[in-house]
Image (cartoon, helix red, strand yellow):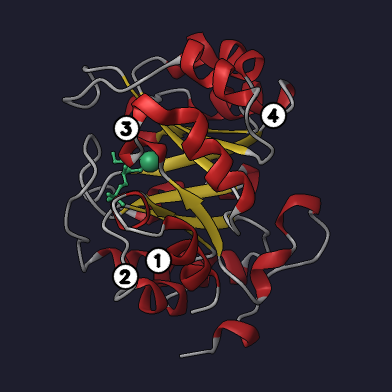
Amino acid sequence: MPSLSTRRGIRGDTLLFHIFATMPIVAPSLLASNFLDLRGECSMLNESEADWYHLDVMDGRFVPNISFGLPVIAQMREATTKPFDVHLMIEEPGKYAADFKLAGADHLIVHYEVCPHLHRNIQQIKNLGMKAGVAINPHTPVQLLQDILHDLDIVLIMSVSPGFGGQQFIPHSLSKIQMLRQRIDEMQLNTIIEVDGGVTLENAKTILEAGAHSLVIGTTIFKAADPKSVISRFKHL
Ligand code: DX5
Ligand code: ZN
């Protein structure tokens, strides 16, 4: 397998995304944070080596859980300095895209499984000035993205069933990452492969070697005694 520093397929022409040729993007998932001390958690992340804030929005319909939404994100924006990577686990995401832009989203990721008009959703997100991403559930084949891949800034591979933090990484996700990585390289795209769910210090290197650029990490960071040093360990695997 190629080493992290020699992985290829990335052209250096996308501003936000130039760093991952040598270092992973680390995107802590605030779902596992202490909601009673969000300001403190934001300060910690601002000072840390984390790259993005990963914000999991759930509607209790697409996924069997409800998390937080627009007002929380808008207030967090005032306390934070890094891009907001907003993962919408909601039905009809197009209805809310403009509201999430207003709240401060930099990337908006919608689920393949709830978007019969995915092309329209992606164009809408881009026209609003955000990076556009598509998330796929563990049972959704990466091949289904073939005819939209060239339009995507991010593909989020769910390595657990969405809805809850603290679950076990599904090993089959690795072959999905490899397959997608190969396709992105063949097409010479800049699309970022982000992996979400069950990422730990034990499996992160394997996930990156399979071809991922960005790691979403909730439990392993926020339940640690020293989250900043854990973030640093993910950056320097
Ligand atoms: C699950 C969310 C994830 C999750 C990751 O639906 O999309 O972002 O919070 O958390 P861990 O790292 O605990 O699996
Ligand atoms: Zn997520």
Q: Does residue 185 lie above or below 107 as drawn?
A: below
Tell me the crowding category of disc 3: few under 14, some 14 to 19, or many 20 or more residues within 10 angstroms, Cα based. Answer: some
Sequence order check: which comes first, mark 4 or mark 2? 4
Image coordinates of residue 85 in percent, x first then y, are 55, 38
Residue in front for this viewpoint, 183 or 74: 74
Residue type indicated by callout 4: Lys
Sequence order check: which comes first, mark 4 or mark 1? 4
- State whether residue 88 appears in this view: no
Q: Residue 177 got which mark? A: 1
Image coordinates of residue 26 in percent, x first then y, are 52, 58
Image coordinates of residue 58 in percent, x first then y, are 31, 23
Separation of disc 3 and disc 2 at Cα? 20 Å
| Label 1 SS | helix
Labelled pair 2, 1 in contact (Cβ < 8 Å): yes
Q: Does residue 227 lie above or below 95 as drawn?
A: below
Q: Is residue 79 left or right of residue 172?
A: right
Residue type indicated by callout 2: Leu
Provide the residue designation for mark 2: 174
Residue in front for this viewpoint, 145 or 52: 52
Separation of disc 4 and disc 2 at Cα? 29 Å
Q: Residue 15 got which mark? A: none
Q: Residue 113 got which mark? A: 3
Q: Quadrant of residue 159?
A: bottom left
Q: Quadrant of residue 23?
A: bottom right
Separation of disc 3 and disc 1 at Cα? 18 Å
Q: Residue at x 22, y 61 (%)?
A: 169
Provide the residue designation for mark 4: 126
Residue type indicated by callout 1: Ile
Separation of disc 4 and disc 3 at Cα? 20 Å
Residue type indicated by callout 3: Glu
